[in-house]
Image (cartoon, grey):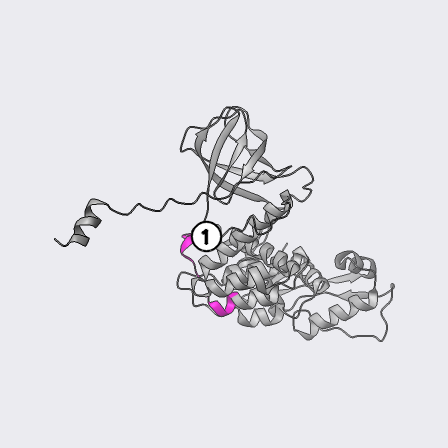
Amino acid sequence: MSLKSWFEKTFPPEEPQQQRAERRAVQGLEAIHWTGSSPGLDIVRNISSTGMYLVTRERWPQGEVNPIRLVYPELNDDSPERQVTLETKSVRWGEDGMGLTFILPETMDLWLWNTDGIVEPPDILNEFRLALALAFLRRICPSAGHELKLLFREGLSNLRIESITSIAHRAEAMVAAEKDFDLLRAPQNVVMRVIKEGSWAEDSTTQQLWAGILATACTPIGDDESNLPYIDLLAELASIDGRLFTVACTKSQKIFASYGAVSAEPVVCSAQELMQIAGAHDLMKIDRNIFQLANLGLLEPRVKSKYFNFEQEANLTPTALGLELFARCQGHRGAPHEYYAALPGNSESPSKGGSAPLT
């Protein structure tokens, strides 16, 4: 045995100690839990990228796993995609509470302390939402992991990040309802198109449409690019377009043909109804939005007068293509008539004339 080998065997190098994640107190950060003898709202004394200390009367057994929702007093948006609920595991007890470690996705990368300034509760929740959305996208599209991280951390504006984060959370909720959801994958070109185009969607209605397209792109093999033409259509929709299109597809009475096609009965809206749907009062602008949807082939064409006024009614009847797109946007991969026939109260039985309106 050489002198070097003897020395290394006798005096092995010390293993480097794992650096503990930085913990900070964030004034106003709280957590809701639903377990134990006193479920309710408790104060988060400090938090890091790996766990937190919760001031509480609870003492969960060591190793027990429970969900925790992070909140703060000023939080007034409780929509699912704006919430942050984390799986936590009890690791230690203290005099006034317990230490919890986070159970996070392997692809998750938290940047809680990317500033030396004061970090507020909204900053913590926003970072968790962003990191969870990024982790989901990296899971369904591992080949784009590096590019996704660059886009989320450097390439997109804060507003676009907020939009695509909401889209990703909505899509993940859809995917999570499927069998073996953790094995589903999506093609890189589809995922990147959804991010680059869908991140411009500012309202929740249009974000939901993008989420469905992303969810239906996830398959066991991960090579389904059939949503690319639908992405081309969605990329043309502004916020008002998305609202009008959604109402047209949800409110219209459906007709099934005996050969499996689905169409819609005429949908006619007054000017007042249009303004309510669009969330706008400019009838000329709304008229242009309807004309845009018709040009895209999503609504039936109408005779367009030179001026639109309060006495007129507008046609919001969706086309077969519009109904097909909308079904995809609701997370349905199969034939459109299967989606609409499965809705509560609907029936697919054709009438003597070959079709039957849905009631």
* Residue depicted at 56% across the width and 72% down the height: 229
User: Which residue was labeled with disc 1?
Assistant: 178
Is 297 placed above or below 164 here? below
Highlighted magenta segment, given as a residue range: 179-191
Query: Which secondary structure, mark 1?
Result: loop
Q: Quadrant of residue 261?
A: bottom right
Question: Residue 12 in the image: x percent, y percent?
Answer: 24, 46
Is 271 on the left or on the right of 157, as rendered? right
How many numbered discs?
1
Is 248 placed above or below 32 here? below
Question: Residue 341 in the image: x percent, y percent?
Answer: 55, 57
| Residue sitting nearer the eye, 317 or 68 | 68
Question: Residue 136 in the image: x percent, y percent?
Answer: 49, 55
Question: Residue 325 in the image: x percent, y percent?
Answer: 59, 66
* Residue depicted at 82% across the width and 58% down the height: 272
Is 25 on the left or on the right of 307, as rendered? left
Mark 1 surroundings: few (<14), some (14-19) or many (≥20) residues within 10 A: few
- Decide if residue 17 is in sight here: yes
Q: Quadrant of residue 139?
A: bottom left
**Quadrant of the image containing the C terminus:** bottom right
- Decide if residue 348 is in sight here: no
251 in magenta: no
Is 14 placed above or below 244 here? above
| Residue sitting nearer the eye, 111 or 189 | 111
| Residue sitting nearer the eye, 219 or 14 | 14
| Residue sitting nearer the eye, 16 or 63 | 16
Indicate the amino acid at tag 1: Glu
